Amino acid sequence: MGVSIDSKFTNGAWAKSLGGVNYPLLSDFHPKGAMAAAYGLYLDARGISDRATVLIGTDGKVQWSESVGPPGKREAADLLAKCRSC
């Protein structure tokens, strides 16, 4: 699933711009960034969340995480490989 501090409307527009996505998108909009803050990823001073990937196992525990900073970029193939290895 994808989580963003953007509204559900913004998430929907983003998904549409990609031609749709096959996973759920959740909005961490109100209270803004509550979920991001729980993972230590909300950047309070800037009012945004860090760009990060967090893989959570079926046991509910974090298996792996990576922060790339707000302007950062992730490679889909690398993320898929990491998902398969966890």
Image: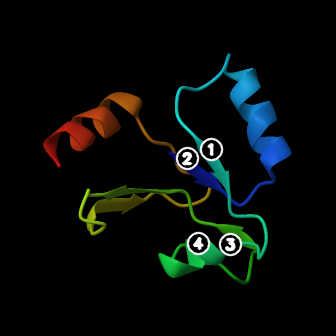
Q: Judge left or right: residue 77 versus residue 84.
A: right
Q: Judge left or right: residue 2 versus residue 7.
A: left
* Location of residue 29 in the rendering, given as x and y in whole percent from the top left corner: 77, 64
Mark 3 and mark 4 in contact (Cβ < 8 Å)?
yes
Query: For residue 50, which quarter of the picture?
Result: bottom right
- Residue 8: assigned label: none
**Residue at numbered disc 1:** 25
**In this view of the protein, can residue 71 be seen by the observer?**
no
Question: Tag 4, which secondary structure?
Answer: helix
Mark 2 and mark 1 in contact (Cβ < 8 Å)?
yes
Label 1: few (<14), some or many (≥20) within 10 Å? Answer: some
Name the amino acid type tagged 1: Leu
Spatial CA distance of label 4 from label 2 is 12 Å
Of residue 80 and residue 28, the one placed in the foreground of this image is 28
**Residue at numbered disc 2:** 2
Does residue 47 lie above or below 13 as drawn?
below
Q: Earlier in the sequence, mark 1 or mark 4?
A: 1
Name the amino acid type tagged 4: Met
* Location of residue 19 in the rendering, given as x and y in whole percent from the top left corner: 68, 16
Q: Earlier in the sequence, mark 3 or mark 2?
A: 2
Rendered residue at 44%/41% (across/down): 74
**In this view of the protein, can residue 13 be seen by the observer?**
yes
Q: Earlier in the sequence, mark 1 or mark 2?
A: 2
Q: Which residue is outermost to the front?
A: 59
Q: Earlier in the sequence, mark 1 or mark 3?
A: 1
